[in-house]
Amino acid sequence: MYIYIKMKIIILSILSLLSFFALNVSQADISGNITYEYTYFPQDALYEDQENDNSSFSGEITYYKQITAGTSFNIKPFYRFDEVDKNRNHGDLREAYFLTAFADFELSYGINKVYWGATEFNNVVDIINQDDFVEGFGTDEKLGQPMVQFNYLYDIGGIEFFVLPYHRAREFADIDGGRPQFALPIETDEPYYEDDKKEQHIDYAIATTNTFGDFDVRLSGFVGTDRSPVFLPINFHPVLGKPTILQPAYYQMQQIGLDITAAIDSWLLKLEMIDKKIDEIDADYNAGTAGFEYTLVGLFGRSDLGILMERAYDSRKKNIPTTLFQNDVMAGLRLSLNDASSTTFLLGYVHDLDDGADIMSLEFERRIADSFKIKFEAQHFKNAENDINLNQFRRDESYRLLLGYYF
């Protein structure tokens, strides 16, 4: 059944691409990139068949066409080829939608990505799109979501209403070589859905965004299939009685969210909060992240230095794999050189107040000439064995180098 659903996605993707080629490509905006990625894991793997390094190539094209004065079409296909992890060999339509604007209204339909959130380290309100989990640990990449979106704009903000007719299940690293991966294999071919309609359950979301002086405030609501799975132990060992496979379970839920940003002089204040309820498993919890970014402008001449500090909270139990940031403090430094090459550095640090586990990260990005960009990412864990969730990734600290050609 699940393979059949995947085939439907492929067919819909092909039809969308055909509509792309059917449009007149003249006077259209076309851009994209081809990126080589190399990842090195300095520690030996915790699980069998995992490699200490791997290479991959990815490509993404963005096509934008103004069809009439009020109608446009946008498509953004993506594909990655990975030499080790077969689950990372995947393609996705990040975007493929028509947008029609008239007076104070906007209507879009197709496949799109929508971001909700304010904070740097942990976005709890962002619920519309599914995480593209195979792209990497802690990635911000999202899968394209089929949707109909209606916007009404007014003087101080707007209202967004979404109809989401299809749910996309999360993918995970391949058990044969993928890294990082969970301690137990994830059954991705047959996820469990609470609703009988499974992936085809229709979800709804609404958000209102308003500006009050220095404050941007968004209040959001979502009713439908959760994007974050709960993992059910299945296929128990006949002698030891322990589970050997985890099955992702997607339950129906209701979420109310609030995110606020306030720009006051050199300060940027940030807040995200949710209240979430899942009736089937009697789960009713809240989570949030709050913090600030203070920017020192003109440091060392023309450079800007941002100082970040955030606090994350989640009322769920620690033994749920999706609650990595249950009681944590985050700090970071963002340095922008403001040079011709757009050089930036981002240093991040996360400390768990319950068990003392630490996550440290470094990102460096710089443009080379006009068409190339180089990026370096490093991630290091400390006291990971103290954290019930981070422990399974304790040897997966990594160094990643990306070289992209942009056109």
Image (tube, grey):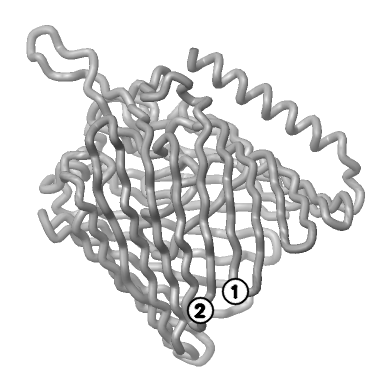
Q: Is residue 376 left or right of residue 91?
A: left
Which residue is nearer to you in this view: 193 or 96? Answer: 193
Determine the residue positioned at 30% across, 37% down: 278
Q: Amino acid at mark 1?
A: Ile
Q: Nearer the viewer, residue 223 or 37?
A: 223
User: Label 2: few (<14), some or many (≥20) within 10 Å?
Assistant: few
Q: Tell me which corner region of the image, top left, top right, bottom left or bottom right, holds residue 192.
A: top left
Of residues 288 and 74, which is closer to you in this image?
288
Can residue 57 be seen in the rendering of this structure?
A: no
Query: Between 110 and 217, which is closer to the camera in this rendering?
Result: 217
Q: Secondary structure at mark 2?
A: strand
Q: Quadrant of the C terminus?
A: bottom right
Above or below 34: residue 288: below
Q: Whole-percent x and y of residue 92? A: 59, 35
Q: Do the CB atoms of the residues marked 1 and 2 lie less than 8 Å apart?
A: yes
Residue 355: image location, x then y, percent: 10, 54
Residue 198 is left or right of residue 184, and the answer is right
Type of amino acid at the residue the image marks with label 2:
Phe
Residue in the picture at 56% in, 80% down: 338
The secondary structure type at the circle numbered 1 is loop
> What residue lies at 44% left-to-right and 72% top-to-bottom?
261
Q: Based on the displayed image, in which of its 4 quarters is residue 50 positioned?
A: top left
Disc marking residue 156: 1
The residue that disc 2 covers is: 212
* Furthest residue toward top: 238
* Residue 108: % across, % down: 70, 47
Q: Judge whether 122 appears above or below 263 on screen.
A: above
